[in-house]
Image (cartoon, rainbow, N blue to C red):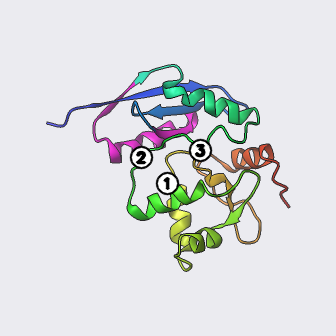
Amino acid sequence: MVSSVKLFIDKISSEIGTILIVSNGEKLCALDFADYEPRMCKLLQKRYPSFYFQETKNPQGFSSLVKAYLIGDRYSLENIPVDTGGTPFQQQVWLALQTIPWGSTISYGQLAAKINKPTAARAVGLANSLNPIAIVLPCHRVIGSNNVLTGYAGGLERKRWLLNHEMVILP
């Protein structure tokens, strides 16, 4: 019998909707939007076949750090410890997202090259779409090679908001 894992969840309000912050007690293991909670739970279930949420205010201080980002602190997310799960390739892509500086964007092809897999732009795009820790692992900074906003699991309007928040000039 698999024992059920307790995950700590907080919900914070923001200009782009309610944000769900999930911790395993030590590391951030999910960050998503309330209207995408079923997707988030599905991704968590791959890592924790049996889990339950305990509502907690500001687990490990992560909620405060996300709120600081949302009001303009460009450094608040840099040292948040993450537990992403996923395949080794997905982990490589997700951790490479942290190397994209605030206010910058790169293409899927450039991200593929950055992880030494220059022909894997599509696979990078797929991994990006399954990023379990939005904003902290800034997949919103990855755009199409023609500088066009392309898919974002939280919706293109949120991606646009996040990039505008980071003062990215979009065409």
Say which residue appears at 43% left-offset and 65% top-offset: 89
Q: Earlier in the sequence, mark 2 or mark 1?
A: 2
Q: Earlier in the sequence, mark 1 or mark 3?
A: 1
Mark toward the viewer: 1 or 3 = 3
Write the start and end of the magenta stretch as one range: 28-53
Residue 100's image quarter?
A: bottom right
Which dot marks residue 130? Answer: 1
Mark 1 is surrounded, within 10 Å at the Cα level, by few (under 14), some (14 to 19) or many (20 or more) other residues, namely some
Q: Position of residue 151 (x, y in %)?
A: 64, 58
Say which residue appears at 42% left-offset and 39% top-offset: 41
Say which residue appears at 39% left-offset and 62% top-offset: 88
Find out whether the residues at labels 2 and 1 contact each other: C-beta distance under 8 Å: yes
**Amino acid type, label 3:** Val
Q: Where does label 2 land, which residue?
A: 43
Say which residue appears at 65% left-offset and 37% top-offset: 76
**Amino acid type, label 1:** Leu
Residue toward you, 97 or 125: 97
